[in-house]
Amino acid sequence: MKHQLDFEKPILELQRKLEELKNHSKAHALDIRLEEEIRLIEQKIEETRKQIYADLTPWQRVQLARHPKRPFALDYIERAFTGFTELHGDRLFGDDRAVVGGFAQLGEQRVVVISTQKGRDTKENIMRNFGSAHPEGYRKALRLMRLADKFGLPILTLIDTAGAYPGIGAEERHIAEAIAVNLREMMLLEVPVIATVIGEGGSGGALGIGVADRVLILENAYYSVISPEGCAAILWKDRSAAAKAAAALKITAKDLLDLGLVDEIVPEPLGGAHNDAAVAAATLQQHWLRHLAALQAIPTTERLRQRYAKYRAYGHFLEKPPAETQPATA
């Protein structure tokens, strides 16, 4: 199996043994003992898979979020939506292929869907800039959001990016300003907005399309102010401490739900979304439709008030009072 992660090696070994037994069974007459052994190994694979994925570390979930076979935004758009019509360009500078967006149909509901998109191979990754958007990508996203607001269409954003592009060209075209404007304008949109982290949710690059009435996250996705490697390089001066940083950052879906930073965790097929993209897309579609129905039942003024209150509530913390100074004793 290609792209096997380190913690999946026990499953890989069992699968190899199973394949050998099946080949042996085909080459020889039917052997009841072989059939029984095959059945036992298949059962063992299922049990091992459940044990491994029931107790993943934060770093292992980061690895799953980056899995090269994991469904990307266009994979979900193809499976969960119909009639997708992509729109291009920000009408100011150019078209950023790292951001994909347009009109689509979700069940019976017309929507605008906007996403960050990675590539499957080197050629596509260069075209998509590895999913890291330039300023024109965020301005394109804002253009589509304003269209959605004008025509009363709900907005769904799919987030999968390591972060906004930090290059010289992006700085020259004001990447920070583009993201900041999106944060401000998304807070004021009168239509329902649902953001979903489907893979990596990296820093301001994710937040640029992440302000929403509901923030969902896939079970093995992560949302973070900085990558584990970047955090490790700053705090421990060693990128190999990424696993330690991933645990300290509290970036997994469960951590984020506990902290109140996301509204719901969307379950994935056993082993990750890449094991059954169709099931993952169907699950997402059900969650989107349910949340859309709930949001559309709320009056616009109240929905805007709740959105504002939601983000104002972020960032609460407690300070431990300093220990009282004990008088010196002789």
Image: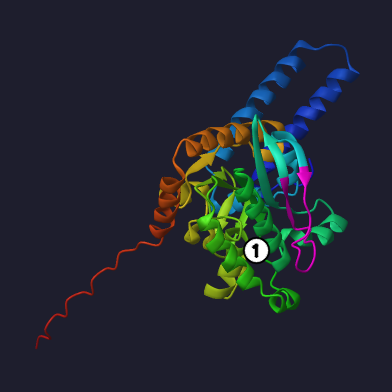
Residue sticking out furthest to the left: 330
Classify 140 as above or below 234.
above
Residue where numbered disc 1 is placed: 163
Q: Is residue 113 left or right of residue 182?
A: right
The residue lying at 56 percent from left, 75 percent from top is: 234
Look at the image and say whether residue 88 sits in the magenta stretch: yes
Quadrant in which the N terminus is drawn: top right
Give the percent coordinates (x, y) of residue 233.
Answer: 59, 73
Left/right of residue 313 with respect to residue 204 in the rendered view: left
Position of residue 201 relative to residue 274, above or below, is below
- Residue 14, relative to residue 156: is it above or below? above
Residue closest to the far front: 150
Specify the amino acid type for callout 1.
Gly
Q: Point out the stretch of residues depicted in magenta.
A: 85-102
Closest to the observer: 319 or 113?
113
Corner quadrant of residue 152: top right
100 or 20: which is nearer to us? 100
Please tell me which residue is depicted at 78% across the width and 47% down the height of the picture: 86
The reply to whether residue 60 is visible in this rendering is: no
The quarter of the picture where the C terminus appears is bottom left
Q: Position of residue 43 (x, y in %)?
A: 64, 23
How would you classify the magenta stretch by its main secondary structure?
A: loop
